[in-house]
Amino acid sequence: MSKNKEYTDKLRKEAQEGGYLLNPDQAFVDDLAQGLLANIERYGYGGCPCRLNKGEYEADKDIICPCDYRDNDLNEYGICYCGLYVVKEIAEGQKELSSIPDRRKKALLAKKSTNNGAEVTQETTKLNGKYPVWRCSVCGYLCARTQPPEICPICKVSKDRFELF
């Protein structure tokens, strides 16, 4: 079995386990998988092949597949920016595919102005003053504990994709 086929099968399995669907166009998914594999070899992580990766993990963290924008794109457009993930209506051919805007630039600008200069500390983000609340930046999973989980139980991304909520 080729590396690309193994990776595509892994993507499909992880998507199904998380309640997601991949694009029904297998050739398209294979091309995206090839791009993700190229980025894994190039950078050490699977940055979205449809976006410009800087090659710096921290700078690209929000666009590592599955990206931070996937669920919002699926909810609003029925498809993620690169077209890897789709909703049921698209997968079953009941809804037409359409291009969607890249919400990354808008999100990065909003993130810069979110705090309005206020300092955010662990004290200000603790639940009942006891535990910090961690949010998965990909799926929105919330947990109140001393540290984020090693792997998100919902979307399976690593702990570095969590942020204080």
Image (tube, rainbow, N blue to C red):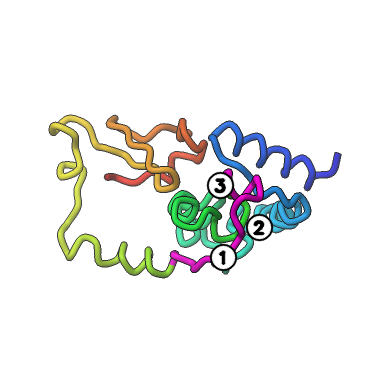
Element carrying mark 3: loop
Residue 153 image position (x, y, % from top left): 46, 30
**Badge 1 amino acid:** Asn
Labels 3 and 2: the sequence-earlier one: 2
Check disc 2 and report the residue beneath it: 39
Labels 3 and 1: the sequence-earlier one: 1
**Badge 2 amino acid:** Asn
Q: Alpha-carbon neighbours of circle 3 within 10 Å: few (<14), some, or many (≥20)? A: some
Label 3 vs label 1, nearer the camera: 3
Residue 22 colored in magenta in the image: no
Element carrying mark 2: helix
Residue 70 image position (x, y, % from top left): 49, 52
Q: Alpha-carbon neighbours of circle 2 within 10 Å: few (<14), some, or many (≥20)? A: some
Check disc 1 and report the residue beneath it: 53
Name the quarter where the C terminus is drawn.
top left
Residue 49 image position (x, y, % from top left): 63, 61
How far is disc 2 from disc 1 in space, using C-alphas? 9 Å
Element carrying mark 1: loop
Label 3 vs label 2, nearer the camera: 3
**Badge 3 amino acid:** Val
How far is disc 3 from disc 2 in space, using C-alphas? 25 Å
Contact? badges 2 and 1 (CB < 8 Å): yes
Name the quarter where the N terminus is drawn.
top right
Q: Which residues are magenta?
A: 88-104
Contact? badges 3 and 2 (CB < 8 Å): no
Question: Horizontal placement of 148 versus 124: left or right?
Answer: right
Residue drawn where x is 57% and y is 67% of the image: 99
Check disc 3 and report the residue beneath it: 87
Residue 149 image position (x, y, % from top left): 41, 32
Task: Say how many tags the image has.
Answer: 3
